[in-house]
Image (cartoon, rainbow, N blue to C red):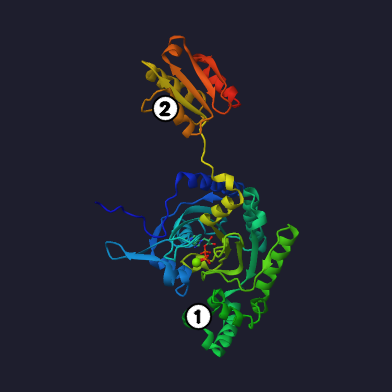
Amino acid sequence: MTKTIQAIRGMNDYLPSDTSVYQYVENRIKKVLLSYGFSEIRLPVIEPTILFTHAIGDITDVVEKEMYTFNDRRGKSVTLRPEGTAGCVRAGISNGLLYNQEQRLWYMGPMFRYERPQKGRYRQFYQIGAEIFGLQGPDIDADLIMMTARFWKILGISDCIHLELNSIGSLESRKHYNHAIIRLLEKNVQVLDEDCKRRMYSNPLRVLDTKNPAIQALLDNIPPIKNYLDDESYEHFNKLCRLLDITGISYHVNQRLVRGLDYYNNTVFEWVTNSLGAQGTICAGGRYDCLVKLLGGRHTPAIGFAIGLERLVLLVQKTFPEITKPQSIDLYLIAVGKGTEHAMLLLSENLRNELPELKIIQNFGGGNFRKQFSRAHKYGARFVLILGESEIAHHHCIIKNLCNGKQQIVPLSQASYIIRLLLNISKK
Ligand code: ATP
Ligand code: MG
């Protein structure tokens, strides 16, 4: 017997019962993005490896442990994208989108990270991300964060998600902070795990990201990063906080928030929920003013975020369990008897022309009335339209409401008009 082929671990199939919720969430987010003047950009899922090692940083979880990297047939190292910002910046530079202009771009698609699969953490997952290029003030940071707050509002989940905010300062000011971290870690090497030992010199800030409780306790002893911010970064963060205060967006300043990728500076933020267990970060982002130059463009200030769609959908489903209900159809077409199949094909064409917004399924594969009715029920149809030999002879059909059992005989020429009335649809 042939063994059935399984999907790769951590890579999911998204079944119709899931995709309806994904579409619901994605469509609402896209509407808000459009209203803020963002345009969509579609990017390759596979890029030269160097793009990610360079942009994300060698000493990060993503580059060290999580990338799907392999050689193509010519021996060139390529990587399945683990995130969207690097590719977006690459595309922006090579297509001349960034020089001396503002850009507001959004993207959506699969990302790939070789992680241990668990609830809310997969090896292929989807992100919706947005990037703004060419603006550097704290006002645009506030605008972007307010837009994300609007996503949660229109999805009805504002009450179960909160904002964590921090500034990690300029690259320069971070050097001083790194020294302070190294000094503390050197005094406590015995507490450190392998990851932190390796990172303490190459990327000390990353140690703040540790999930190891013993090291977290140790880190309580270093002064907060805000004590090390240069004047400009300090002022930027203060202004951002003030703008969020004015607009009523609550936030928690989290001095430990440094984000997992190297390219951030100044503003960093995460929207976190307590409802999904360990995988609580739904949306994460920050400012990355040096990345465009690092990847070969002119200096261009930038800020962006990415939403993990699986986690967002889990949260929406948890808040509104009824949303997962399978979608019902409006009308099921039943035909029994000689010549009725042809007549039904013509009628269904006519109904689809007249009522393009309706979900209509026509019975195929024959069967008696009972069988066809049971199929209609399986589809959750609201109405059935019945065509038998006698109906055809009299140029009419029967329309039955499956919710209350009421039925009526209707002239064929008026079928679409009556269905429109019954379903309470206005003519466009
Ligand atoms: P985490 O700390 O949970 O690993 P991260 O800092 O690595 O997250 P980012 O690179 O900031 O994540 O990605 C942005 C968002 O993408 C995350 O907040 C999360 O919602 C989602 N995300 C990241 N990795 C995964 C994954 N393996 N599976 C599902 N969603 C993910
Ligand atoms: Mg991660």
The amino acid beneath tag 1 is Cys
Which quarter of the image is occupied by the C terminus?
top right
Amino acid beneath label 2: Lys
**Residue 199: x, y in percent?**
49, 80
Q: Residue at x 66, y 51 (%)?
A: 153
Q: Residue furthest front?
A: 370
Q: Position of residue 232 (x, y in %)?
A: 66, 72
- Near mark 2 (Cα within 10 A), the count class, few <14, some 14-19 or many ≥20, is few
Residue 392 against residue 427 in the figure, above or below:
above
Q: Secondary structure at mark 1?
A: helix
Lateral position of residue 77 relative to residue 387, left or right: left
Which numbered disc flags the more N-terminal residue, 2 or 1?
A: 1
Q: Measure the C-alpha gap from mark 2 to mark 1.
A: 66 Å
Residue where numbered disc 1 is placed: 196
Q: Which residue is mark 2?
A: 371
- Label 2 beta carbon within 8 A of ligand 1: no
Query: Where is 260 relative to 397, above or below?
Result: below
Label 2 or label 1, whichever lies nearer to me, is 2
Mark 1 Cα-neighbour bin, 10 Å: few <14, some 14–19, many ≥20: many
Res 228 quadrant in image: bottom right
